[in-house]
Amino acid sequence: MKGSIVLSGVEVIFPHSNFDLSFRHLEIEPGRVTVITGPSGSGKSTLGHAATGLLPYMGAAIKGTFQLGAITIPLADRKAWRGVRGRAVRWIPQEPARVFTSTLPLLPQMLEGIENPKAHADTLAKLLDVTGLPNQDTLKVRYPFELSGGMLQRAAVISAFLPTPALVVADEPTAHLDQPKCLLLARIVTALARHAQTAVLWITHDLRLAAAIAHRVIFLSNGRIEMDGSPLDLLDPYGEKPLPLVKASARLALPV
C-alpha cells in the first residue's frame, strides 16, 4: 500500500482537560519528510498517535479518518487499524531502549511484525552496513543493553523502514543523541524515505534539524495548525512568513 496519506476531520478531546487537537485536512506526501513542530503541549505527539492508530487512550474521544490510497479508516476503529498499523504504518520511538526488551536478542525484535523476514535479508544486511551496526549473525545473539543508545536508535529506524511502509512517524527520535549522531540519523531517515517512497512525519522541537531535513514544516499551537509551509519560508528569519520564534532568535543574535 503506497500513496499520499490524508487525515481528515480530525478532532481529539481528552476528558478533564482544556486541550484538544483539531484540524480539517492534512495530506502527507510519499518520499518526503514533513516536520511537525511547536511548543510543548501543542499536540505534536497526539497528532503522531492519531496518524498511527494509537488513539484513543486515557479516555480520549477521537473523530476523523485516515486515508491511504483507496483505503479509508475511521481513526477510532481499532479493528480496522490492525491490518494497517505495523505494516503500512510504522513508528520510530523517542527512547528505543524502552521499546526493545532487554532480556531478548535484538534482531528478532527488529523483525517483529514483518511478514516473511527472510525476504528482507539482503536489504537488512545493506542497512546494517550503511548504519554501522553489527551484522545479522551478531545481532541474533546480542542484547539491547549491549548496544549504545545511538545504535539502538538506528536499529529502531531500520526496523521501521524494513517492510517499506507507506508512512513512518518519528517521535523526536534524536532527542537523546549528540549533534553528530543526530545528523547521521536524520540523513539515514531522509535517504530511506526517498528510496522507499515512504512518507515521514517527523516530530521535533529542534528547528535547526527541521531546517536540514524537512520538505515541509507544520507548526502546531494549542492543538491547531498555525502555520504550514516550506522550510525556506518558515525557518528563515528573513523569509516571507517566518515562525515568530525564528524571528525572535534572529533579533537576539543581532549585535547591541
Image (cartoon, helix red, strand yellow):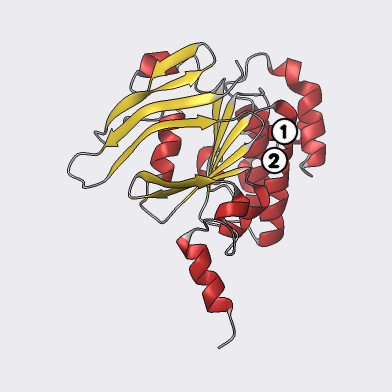
Q: Kindly identify the residue that appears in the image at 50 percent across and 22 percent down.
A: 85
Query: For mark 1, what is the residue?
Result: 194
Rendered-image quadrant of the N terminus: top right
- Kind of residue at badge 2: Thr
Q: Kindly identify the residue that appears in the image at 74 percent across and 38 percent down.
A: 191
- Kind of residue at badge 1: Arg
Q: Nearer the viewer, residue 65 or 129?
A: 65
**Farthest top residue in view:** 70
Rendered-image quadrant of the C terminus: bottom right
Placement of 160 over or under 226, stated as above or below: above
Query: For mark 2, what is the residue?
Result: 190
Q: Nearer the viewer, residue 106 or 13?
A: 13
Left or right of residue 162, residue 8 in this image: left
Numbered disc 2: secondary structure: helix
Mark 2 and mark 1 residues within 8 Å of each other at the beta carbon: yes
Category of crowding for the residue at label 2, using alpha-carbon neighbours closer than 10 angstroms: few (below 14), some (14–19), many (at least 20)? some
Placement of 142 over or under 73, stated as above or below: below
Q: Kindly identify the residue that appears in the image at 63 percent across and 42 percent down.
A: 215
The picture places residue 41, in percent across and down from the top left corner, at: 35, 52
The picture places residue 196, in percent across and down from the top left corner, at: 71, 27
Residue 69 quadrant: top right
Q: Is residue 210 visible?
A: no
Numbered disc 1: secondary structure: helix
Residue 87 quadrant: top right
